[in-house]
Image (cartoon, coloured by chain):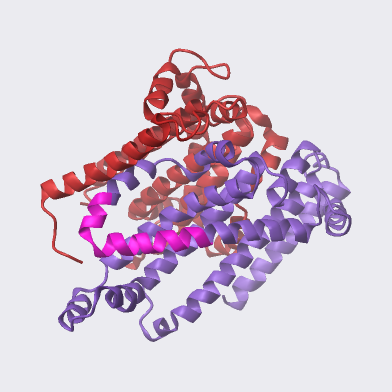
Chain colours: A red, B purple
């Protein structure tokens, strides 16, 4: 490793890197080296991105597609958290439950969330239920695993103290294990949020009748490359915003609990 | 795994199997249009194994998918690990490349599928491109942080002995970062399978995803289940293969204390 760079050097080199990427893109597309359907200019993509907020594509405007994507996403993620976290905590506390659930879970884990698509479509249709199941399949494992690990690695002294005071199962879970494993649980939720967003995109590409992924597939079928790339930008920005929001929430929660 | 755990696990899986048989075949609680019975699954398996389905037999589909994953994964490793090593050992390279990386990273690999199809069509090239994208990011990130977590005395000792840059990277940096590199490769492999299945479901002419897709259109639950099991087994096999490679490459690691996960 060489010497540390000064602040201005870092910014300068970073700007150079970004400029050369965008410059390369602009040069290849702008000078007509490749057809427009292959790679549109950056300006055309940005223009399309803005246009999509006003004129509908595949039945809806971009914000309508985004809101239906986000709706499914929230339902799926919420379902994964509501089932995964309590189950994980309980598995960390009741050994028999752990022994029963773990072999099933380990077997199912090797199935990629996306591979559930055919059954999801068959069971819940392509409207809202099917995609929610795929998001759930993506977001459930990290919720469960992190809650389980968090509960297993709680300071034993805390558990012994609570035991000695005669704490029951329910209060042990709610008042000892849950607070003590909260950092691990929150980290799991963040991983789940990322994987769930990824699964949502996959689900919408394959089975959906609205949403950003659906919009992109429709655009691909009619060879509208600018719309496809505008969809990618929308997905990227939304994913980033979700991550930032969760980081903020995590920080706030930690602060509240005085963990920092 | 203690005997108690094994017994309970075995009992659970047997109970689940019985429940499956009971719900689908004996009571008909779950209609076979929704979830296949064991016998239907076996029939579907026999059909695809001997006569073929979606244009080929099961081994042919599986080999096709494994080949695509292996190729995309290999390209990602061949490009991602060197880039991570470069970014890790040179702060200038890091400053230059990191912003580009930050710009592209929020876009999930699966979102590249429509663009890949526009660029390269429904054939193998588009799949390899998407797998490359998916597997590239974990390979770079983990290699990079592996290099950055090397202890300073190691680097300084090599520097003091006047190790030339090429040998410095190949004989000091890469081996010291290799545990993290393998962590990255494991994540890359997982991402490769997810991406391949998604890409094949969106549009493919052959492969396990094509089997799933056609079975969904035909409303053939038995074949869907066979396809899912095949995907899971292939993923499991390649993961074992990688773990085997890791154990061989990092044999020296057994002499060290195992770090807590």
Q: Nearer the viewer, residue A132 or B101?
A: B101
Whether residue A161 is visible: no
Q: In this view, does B53 lie to the left or right of B120?
A: right
Find out whether residue B89 is within the magenta segment.
yes
User: Which residue is painted at 49% across and 19% down in the image?
Assistant: A64
Residue drawn at x 54%, y 18% as measured from the top left = A57
Which residue occupies 74% across, 60% down? B15
Q: Which of B34 and A44 is in front in this view?
A: A44
Relative to B112, residue B75 above or below: below
**Viewed as shown, does residue A21 lie left or right of B29?**
left
- Residue farthest toward the bottom in the current orientation of the protein: B255
Q: In this view, does B19 lie to the left or right of A212?
A: right
Give x and y (percent) for residue B19: 77, 53
Q: Hey, which quadrant is residue B114 in on the image?
A: top right
Nearest to the observer: residue B173 or residue A153: B173
Q: Give the range drawn in magenta.
A: B74-96
Query: In this rendering, does residue B188 appear at all?
Result: yes
| Residue A11: percent from left, percent from top | 17, 44
Q: Is residue A102 left or right of residue A171?
A: right
Query: In which quarter of the view is residue B162 placed?
Result: bottom left
Q: In which quarter of the image is the C terminus of chain B?
A: bottom left
| Quarter placement of the N terminus of chain B | bottom right
């Amino acid at each position: 490793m060489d010497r540390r760079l000064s602040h201005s050097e870092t910014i300068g080199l970073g700007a150079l890197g970004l400029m050369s990427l965008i410059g390369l893109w602009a040069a290849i597309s702008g000078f007509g080296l490749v057809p427009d359907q292959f790679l549109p200019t950056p300006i055309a993509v940005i223009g399309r991105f803005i246009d999509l907020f006003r004129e509908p594509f595949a039945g809806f405007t971009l914000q309508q597609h985004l809101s239906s994507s986000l709706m499914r996403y929230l339902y799926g993620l919420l379902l994964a958290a509501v089932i995964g976290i309590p189950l994980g905590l309980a598995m960390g506390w009741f050994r028999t439950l752990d022994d029963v659930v773990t072999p099933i879970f380990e077997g199912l884990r090797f199935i990629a969330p996306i591979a559930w698509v055919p059954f999801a479509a068959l069971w819940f249709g392509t409207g809202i239920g099917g995609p929610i199941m795929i998001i759930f399949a993506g977001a459930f494992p990290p919720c469960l695993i992190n809650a389980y690990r968090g509960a297993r690695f709680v300071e034993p002294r805390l558990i012994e103290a609570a035991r000695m005071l005669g704490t029951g199962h329910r209060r042990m879970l709610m008042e000892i294990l849950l607070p003590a494993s909260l950092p691990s649980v929150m980290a799991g939720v963040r991983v789940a949020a990322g994987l769930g967003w990824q699964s949502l995109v996959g689900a919408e590409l394959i089975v959906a009748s609205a949403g950003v992924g659906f919009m992109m597939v429709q655009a691909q079928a009619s060879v509208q490359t600018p719309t496809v790339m505008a969809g990618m930008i929308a997905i990227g920005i939304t994913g980033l915003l979700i991550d930032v929001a969760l980081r903020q929430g995590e920080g706030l929660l930690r602060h509240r609990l005085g963990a920092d | 795994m203690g005997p108690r755990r094994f017994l309970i696990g075995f009992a659970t899986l047997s109970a689940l199997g019985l429940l499956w048989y009971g719900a689908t075949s004996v009571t008909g609680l779950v209609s076979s249009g929704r979830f296949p019975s064991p016998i239907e699954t076996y029939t579907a398996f026999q059909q695809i194994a001997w006569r073929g389905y979606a244009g080929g037999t099961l081994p042919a589909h599986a080999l096709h998918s494994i080949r695509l994953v292996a190729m995309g994964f290999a390209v990602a490793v061949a490009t991602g690990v060197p880039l991570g090593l470069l970014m890790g050992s040179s702060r200038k390279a890091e400053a230059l490349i990191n912003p580009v990386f930050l710009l592209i990273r929020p876009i999930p690999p699966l979102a590249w599928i429509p663009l890949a199809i526009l660029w390269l069509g429904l054939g193998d090239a588009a799949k390899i491109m998407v797998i490359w994208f998916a597997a590239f990011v974990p390979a770079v990130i983990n290699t990079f942080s592996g290099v950055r977590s090397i202890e300073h005395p190691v680097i300084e000792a090599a520097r003091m002995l006047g190790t030339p840059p090429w040998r410095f990277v190949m004989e000091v940096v890469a081996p010291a970062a290799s545990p993290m590199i393998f962590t990255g490769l494991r994540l890359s492999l997982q991402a490769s399978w997810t991406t391949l299945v998604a890409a094949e479901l969106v549009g493919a002419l052959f492969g396990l995803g094509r089997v799933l897709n056609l079975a969904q259109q035909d409303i053939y639950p038995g074949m869907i289940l066979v396809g899912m099991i095949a995907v899971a087994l292939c993923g499991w096999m390649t993961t074992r293969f990688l773990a085997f490679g890791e154990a061989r490459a990092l044999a020296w690691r057994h002499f060290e204390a195992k770090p807590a996960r």
